[in-house]
Amino acid sequence: MYLRSLHLRHFRNYSDQGIQFDSPKTILVGDNAQGKTNLLEAVELLATLRSRRASRDRELVRKDSSQAQIAATVERRGVGHELVVDLRSNGRRTLKVNGQLLRRQAEFLGQLNAVLFSSLDLDLVRGGPESRRNWLDGVLIQLEPLYTGLLEHYRRVLKQRNALLKAQREPTGQTGHSFRDSEMAFWNRELATVGSRIVRRRARLLQRLEPLADHWHRAISDGQETLRLSYRPQVPLPDPEATAEVVQAQFLQEMKTKATAELALGSSLVGPHRDEVEMSINGTAARAYGSQGQQRTLVLALKLAELELIEQVIGEPPLLLLDDVLAELDLHRQNQLLDAIQTRVQTLVTTTHLGSFDAHWLSEAQILQVHAGRLCLYKADQQDSHLSKLPLM
Ligand SMILES: Nc1ncnc2c1ncn2[C@@H]1O[C@H](COP(=O)(O)OP(=O)(O)OP(=O)(O)O)[C@@H](O)[C@H]1O
Ligand SMILES: [Mg+2]
């Protein structure tokens, strides 16, 4: 999979900028707040239709505009495809592949696959459970685009059920009660059906990621450490291979047990929105006991596992987006990463300083300077070995 070109219009701090990717490695260098992460965010959006930093499209559209566009040419199995995402500050999106307007997000997802590794990813170990759930969801969306519909469905069910739980706390007439009870029974079934699908998919994904991540973790820690990943659902799974019916029944049972507490709180306590992923190194919880170095190794291992799994499933390596992380890894971990990706994996890297890069990397990579939402091509000047700027487009 290869991203040949990208064109950003009114996206974040870019007004109109085209980029051709000429080399499997691209380094984006620039001072803080110039637009390096913004560019990777545009690629992340093409891959997942989500951004980790923006909760609404208004933030993605340039401040003085009402509409933004991300356009790209992607090569998959040797065939070129044109992808276009139009974003509006009112939240409405238009998705096109090869000029054809798509009605569903799932048709667009899977056109481009990418693994994003940024300093925010340390939250995968240290942060709350939400970051781990979002990570699993981001991978599932790419491997199984229909999963995005499932998440959306679940979000709606949860919203309705929570609204109903809140309403149930208010006094009502006799008929109101029985109506609400049957409405609640409906939302319970919905939550159990959709929720159990999500839980099963996440648990299966983690099962597939675990041996890959454990392999990388051992390699980086020189065989010293064993990594375990396990999905800890609110509703205990009988076993990972249990049928959908069995899991749904378990859900309904758990909702019964927690009914009083849910009513008191006015929010749903059972379901994948409350699940946790446990990560342990040599049998102890990485979050509480892991050293900083171990946590970094773990996150790197998770990202390499994600890359490997997407490659196995899709049949082509995804893009790797490294936002400010290379400089944070010591040389040993940097080399592990570089060995793993070689030239097979197209990689976009951001940095504020080229100094942290291995000379070999610098000689192979296309280096772009990012300044105030504009890009310039850097070329090594043989005369004085300084890097000189050339306008890009
Ligand atoms: N919707 C928007 N319209 C205009 N400018 C925006 C918009 N959203 C973000 N920006 C600007 O983009 C800049 C941040 O860009 P970005 O996060 O890509 O920086 P960066 O180059 O990655 O910096 P750092 O090295 O600090 O990570 C900020 O100056 C911010 O004001
Ligand atoms: Mg940044």
Image (cartoon, rainbow, N blue to C red):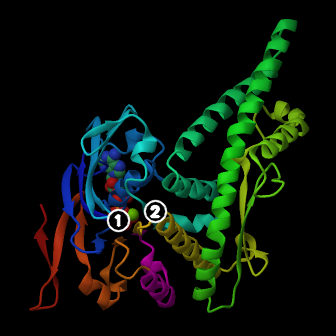
Tell me the kind of residue under disc 1: Met
Which residue sits at x=72%, y=30%? 162
Question: Residue farthest to the left?
Answer: 383
Which residue sits at x=53%, y=68%? 309
Left or right of 114 on screen, residue 362: left
Tell me the kind of residue under disc 2: Ile
Residue 168 appears at what percent x and percent y? Answer: 80, 21
Q: Quarter of the picture for ligand 2?
A: bottom left
Quadrant in the picture for residue 356: bottom left
Is residue 222 at least partly visible in the picture? yes
Residue 142 appears at what percent x and percent y? Answer: 48, 55
Q: Secondary structure at mark 1?
A: loop
Q: Is residue 27 magenta?
A: no
Residues shaded magenta: 322-340
Residue 82 appears at what percent x and percent y? Answer: 25, 50
Q: Residues within 10 Å of mark 2 (few under 14, many from 20)?
A: some
Cβ–Cβ below 8 Å for labels 1 and 2?
yes
Residue beneath disc 2 = 314
Q: Quadrant of the C terminus?
A: bottom left
Where residue 1 is drawn, which disc sits there?
A: 1
Q: Secondary structure at mark 2?
A: helix
Prevailing SS of the magenta stretch: helix
